[in-house]
Image (spheres, grey):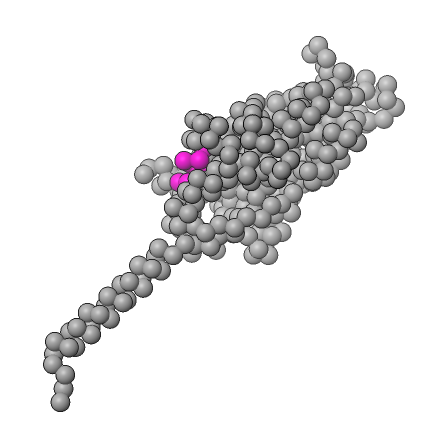
Amino acid sequence: MRPPLSVFRTLLTAAAGLILASAATAQTAPVPVRIGVIPVVGAAPVFVANGEGWLKEAGLAPTFTTFESGPNMIQALASGTIDIYVAGIAPLAVARTKNIDVRVVAATAIEEMVFVAGPKLAPYFKDGADKAEAFRAFHAKEGRAARLATQPPGSVPNTTLQHWLWQVVKAGRPDADIVAMGIDATQQALLAGAVDGASIREPALTIVQSRNPAMTLVATGGEMFPDQPGTVVGVFGAFADKNPQAVEGLVRALVKATDLLKRDPARAAVPVEQALGKGITDVATIQKALTSPAAKFTTDPRAIIEATKKMQAYQVSIGTLDRDIPVDGLFVPSFYEKATAR
């Protein structure tokens, strides 16, 4: 005997309900995302967005990996180890010449890099002395070039330092010796007197000046490279294509985080310290770093397009980039536009 028609209807309704429930679960399941990040204050919007729970609200399940420089992170991006790149803009141009599909969906900070002179070099810059002359005088008295620490060639810190030395200051090449090393090593070398100066960013600036007041801020980010493009958020192309809503949610969370950093740095300092402190510093130090001259936060990727073109042109001139790369495919502001339209 056949079951009554009502039984079939009941079974079909139940099956449809299960399908809809499964679809809803799939849509709301958090998207795993592997984020590579440089441990600097310029990346603070990402740390704040995570600490405030806004990445989770956006449907993301993030894990973080720390890198010492952007060029090192590019290797991880190319190998598929990370999905999101949070570091300087400069290495991304190099990545695109190697057919690595990465798209800048947001900025986080501009004019981060500053130049600090150590106790031996700082006196030569007193009373507004000509900076090229200061390097010459140091060389003449010490019998050697000033040793200046920064990150590897191709990075924003390295590019910015070279631009400031050779284009802005017009220092003599024999008077300055650039030494490439990691972020932590730069800070340690500066404090130990192993180098005479360095291009650094927050929180290193606040930390070295608090530990040794003789550390002197000689040039701000704007002086070193006007509108200097700093930390950005780059998304691996395959991840962006597969998870467009997650990327939009990420950018929306960054917009909220940037607003909080400007409006309430005391609250924002807590998750930033948790990400950067590592027992080395405290919330008060991080809060001071968030409000320093080297902390300028912005999310709009369109704000750094022109400066990025200029930085690329300079990279070509010093040989760290083979050719100018069109920024049309590098910058994808549509995610920011959608996030802010809401």
Q: In the image shown, does 38 or 239 lie closer to the viewer?
A: 38
Q: In the current view of this chain or complex, which residue is farthest to the bottom?
A: 1
- State which quarter of the image contains the N terminus: bottom left
Q: Answer above or below: position of 306 versus 32.
A: above
Q: How many marks?
A: 0
Q: Position of residue 226 (x, y in %)?
A: 57, 25
Where, by quadrant of the figure, is residue 281 drawn? Answer: top right
Name the side, left or right, on which 136 lies relative to 242: right
Q: In the current view of this chain or complex, which residue is farthest to the top?
A: 127
Find out whether residue 9 is within the magenta segment: no
Where, by quadrant of the figure, is residue 276 drawn? Answer: top right
Q: Which residues lie in the magenta part?
A: 252-258
Find out whether residue 256 is within the magenta segment: yes
Q: Position of residue 294 (x, y in %)?
A: 58, 26
Q: Answer above or below: position of 179 versus 67.
A: above
Query: Residue at (83%, 22%) from the top-left corner?
Result: 139
Residue 23 in sight in this render? yes
Q: Position of residue 258 (x, y in %)?
A: 45, 33
Name the side, left or right, on which 320 lies relative to 306: right
Q: In the image shown, does 47 or 243 lie closer to the viewer?
A: 47
Q: In the current view of this chain or complex, which residue is farthest to the right?
A: 143
Query: Residue at (44%, 27%) from the top-left corner?
Result: 264
Query: Residue at (71%, 23%) from the top-left corner?
Result: 212
- State which quarter of the image contains the C terminus: top left
Where, by quadrant of the figure, is residue 5 drawn? Answer: bottom left
Residue 112 in sight in this render? no
Q: Position of residue 310 (x, y in %)?
A: 57, 32
Name the side, left or right, on which 151 lies relative to 282: right
Query: Residue at (31%, 62%) from the top-left corner?
Result: 23
Magenta span: chief secondary structure: helix
